């Protein structure tokens, strides 16, 4: 019998800092011969935001909003292109951080632009949400010791993790694969990577949780 399953043409990987989303997006793009869209990292207001300068949160967030919009708007996902795209962020991620960092008045202005931009962008066919506990992420932050991440406090990291969990608990915009990476290491353990890649290349409908430990498979929600 012929295999009628077609891989999603637009895959997005999401999750909090140091969860492995950029690494997985790179690997998927290489394996699928796909266009890779990377999270914009250059932001002239980011250092000022981490230092707590007045108004820097809005400046940093609005800069990210515009750059993420420009990246995703440029995607060519027309049927004739047959191109596969792998992104290491979804546009909704921007609003998640805006809600954490902006005042009510700033958020009101931000939302006017966000809502307009969102209507003009494609929605992923599949989102892979990588989870990890705050404790695991803190260890990975310390191990990486990136200069730009040293100002990330434990309290802020915990708030980010909570925001992601709440957002994806209610997420229904596309098919969703939730992977808890607290006990696996697809960066350094090839068997973990191969198991995850196998799951991604199988049909995923609705929301599924991938439980790679102990021979567990994905379960539907």
Image (spheres, rainbow, N blue to C red):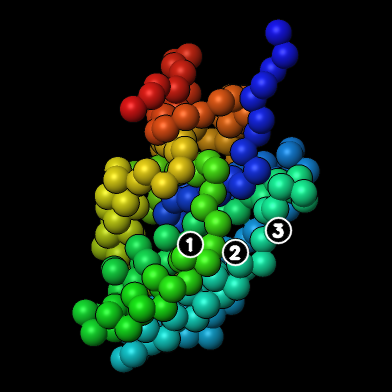
Q: Is residue 13 left or right of residue 28?
A: left
Badge 3 element = loop
Q: Which residue is mark 2?
A: 72
Q: Position of residue 89 (x, y in %)?
A: 52, 57
| Label 2 to label 1: alpha-carbon separation | 8 Å
Residue at 37%, 43% in the rendered image: 172
| Label 2 to label 3: alpha-carbon separation | 9 Å
Name the foreground residue: 145 vs 22: 22
Q: Which residue is mark 1?
A: 91
Residue at 33%, 27% in the rendered image: 221
The quadrant the N terminus occupies is top right
The disc, 3 or 1, on the residue closer to the chain's N-terminal end is: 3
Q: Are the two marked residues, 2 and 1, in contact with CB atoms closer than 8 angstroms?
A: yes
Foreground tag (3 vs 1): 3
Q: Which residue is mark 3?
A: 76
Residue at 42%, 32% in the rendered image: 206
Badge 1 element = loop
Q: Is residue 9 left or right of residue 219?
A: right
Residue 21 in view here: no
> Does residue 207 sit above or below 127 in this rendering?
above
Name the foreground residue: 175 vs 58: 175
Residue at 48%, 14% in the rendered image: 215
């Amino acid at each position: 019998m012929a295999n009628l399953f077609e891989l999603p043409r637009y895959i997005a990987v999401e999750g909090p800092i140091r969860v492995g989303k950029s690494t997985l997006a790179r690997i998927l793009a290489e394996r699928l011969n796909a266009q890779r869209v990377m999270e914009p990292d250059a932001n002239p207001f980011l250092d000022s935001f981490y230092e707590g300068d007045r108004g820097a949160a809005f400046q940093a967030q609005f800069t990210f909003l515009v750059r993420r919009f420009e990246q995703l708007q440029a995607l060519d996902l027309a049927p004739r292109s047959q191109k596969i795209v792998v992104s290491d962020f979804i546009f909704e991620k921007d609003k998640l951080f805006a809600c954490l960092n902006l005042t009510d008045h700033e958020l009101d202005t931000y939302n006017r632009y966000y809502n307009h931009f969102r209507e003009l962008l494609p929605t992923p066919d599949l989102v892979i949400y990588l989870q990890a506990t705050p404790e695991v992420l803190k260890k990975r932050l310390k191990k990486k010791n990136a200069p730009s991440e040293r100002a990330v406090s434990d309290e802020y990291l915990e708030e980010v993790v909570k925001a992601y969990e709440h957002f994806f608990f209610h997420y229904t915009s596309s098919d969703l694969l939730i992977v808890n990476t607290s006990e696996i290491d697809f960066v350094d353990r090839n068997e973990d990577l191969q198991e995850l890649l196998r799951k991604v290349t199988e049909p995923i409908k609705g929301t599924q949780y991938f439980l790679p430990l102990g021979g567990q498979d994905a379960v539907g929600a």
